[in-house]
Image (spheres, rainbow, N blue to C red):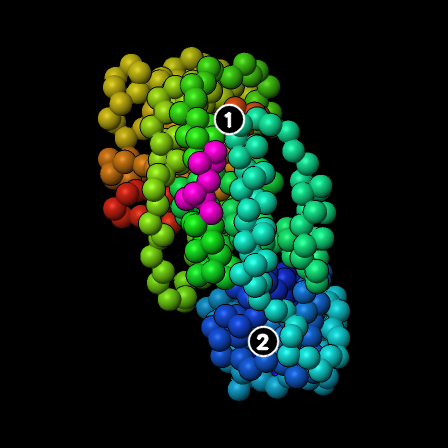
Amino acid sequence: MSRFLSRLSRPAAIQDALDEFVGLGRADFLQKYGFKPARDYFVIDPRTGIEADSKAIVGVAFGYQFPEQGALKPEEFSGGDATVVPLLQSLGFKVIHKSSASAGEDWTRREVELIVADYLDMLTRELTGQRYNKTAHRKRLLEHLPGRSNGSIEFKHANISAVLVELGFPYLRGYKPRVNFQRRLLTEIVSEQAGRYKELDRAALSAVEMPVVPAEFEDFRKVKAPAPPARMAARDEDAAYVARPPIKRDYLERESQNRSLGLAGEEFALRFERWRLIELGVGQLAEKVEHVSQTQGDGLGYDIRSFETDGSERFIEVKTTSFGERTPFFVSANEVRFARSRPEEFRLYRLFDFRQAPRLFELAGPIESHCALDPTTYRASFG
């Protein structure tokens, strides 16, 4: 085994490479990294059942485990039953011998059109509060998508979520966006179908503009959640630049302007912050927490003035959404500048799933250190 391959030891790195393979599609994945199609050995993705070119997967996985060195080039190591196969098997992956050029086939236009139409139907029902059954939808899809597995359909749903977020739409609960996908085809079809789906437009507009009353919430013990990993925003750094698709209406920006939702989120964060300090044993500081956007005005670069246990200040900006944790949010230039000027004291509280079961995660310091920040619109996203 080559000196490079002997260092590859993380199953998660192999899975990351497989995820990218499934998301981009076989042709784009091989072209991106300069590998030729495999002739004999294919590794099975345990999540989707898709067969992927084993040498290419190992080469790309090396870059995931050692990002400072990047993916291995095809000429840097040999593939086959003496090197790549035993490595993959030792890491718990199934490898098959199959003389086939059709493994890991990209989705066809017809297949993508079918799954996008079904996804948008579910999304419309969810936004209007109508009940639907994801399992039943998936079973019906399988009848029309021979050769596709449950796993590959779930993965494609996550790809559709990523495109919708780029287009300014909310995404289906439970299908967190995955940023690697057949970009041109999927973006084209999602844009086309969403643009002519009038019921979806009305449902999305109603969902983001609907007023909200402050949540009746007392138990904050399970409110805190981990922030989406920063690597989601920078995972495809080497890919060619692709402009964000033109959109008719950015529903997520509309939601960010919903004053009722924003105020309810700030009041929730205010109560959470007071509870946090009491739990830490400094109840005397909890009494001093101030909702400055209401007492002093909305222009300071933060909404709440709070404290650490030693009495030092904590400045909190609150951003609230009714949708999932990877929903992009919008900040002002003033908020960005303030976060940069007070990196030790600044916190951004991102509240999500607010209408259903409010939760929040915390971003400390400069906002752009955690997510991709558009320099023109100040749209912050996690991919």
Q: Quadrant of residue 219?
A: top right
> Residue 122: image x %, image y %?
58, 38
Label 1 element class:
loop
Residue range (magenta)? 193-200
Q: Residue at x 65, y 33 (%)?
A: 132
Q: Point out which mark residue 56 bears.
A: 2
Q: Residue at x 37, y 43 (%)?
A: 380
Q: First in sequence, mark 1 or 2: give its number.
A: 2
Q: Quadrant of residue 83?
A: bottom right
Q: Visible in this render: residue 277?
A: no
Compared with 64, 54 (above or below) is below
Quick check: is 307 in the magenta stretch? no
Q: CA separation, marks 1 and 2?
A: 42 Å
Compared with 287, 222 (above or below) is below
Would you say 266 lies left or right of 216 here? left
The residue closer to the viewer here, 19 or 314, is: 19
Q: Visible in this render: residue 191?
A: yes
Type of amino acid under label 1:
Phe
Would you say 179 lies left or right of 313 here? right
> Residue 320: image x %, image y %?
43, 29
Q: Residue at x 58, y 52 (%)?
A: 114
Reading the image, the residue beneath label 1 is 354
Type of amino acid under label 2:
Ala
**Label 2: how many Cα within 10 Å (few below 14, some 14–19, many 20+):** many
> Residue 341: image x %, image y %?
26, 39
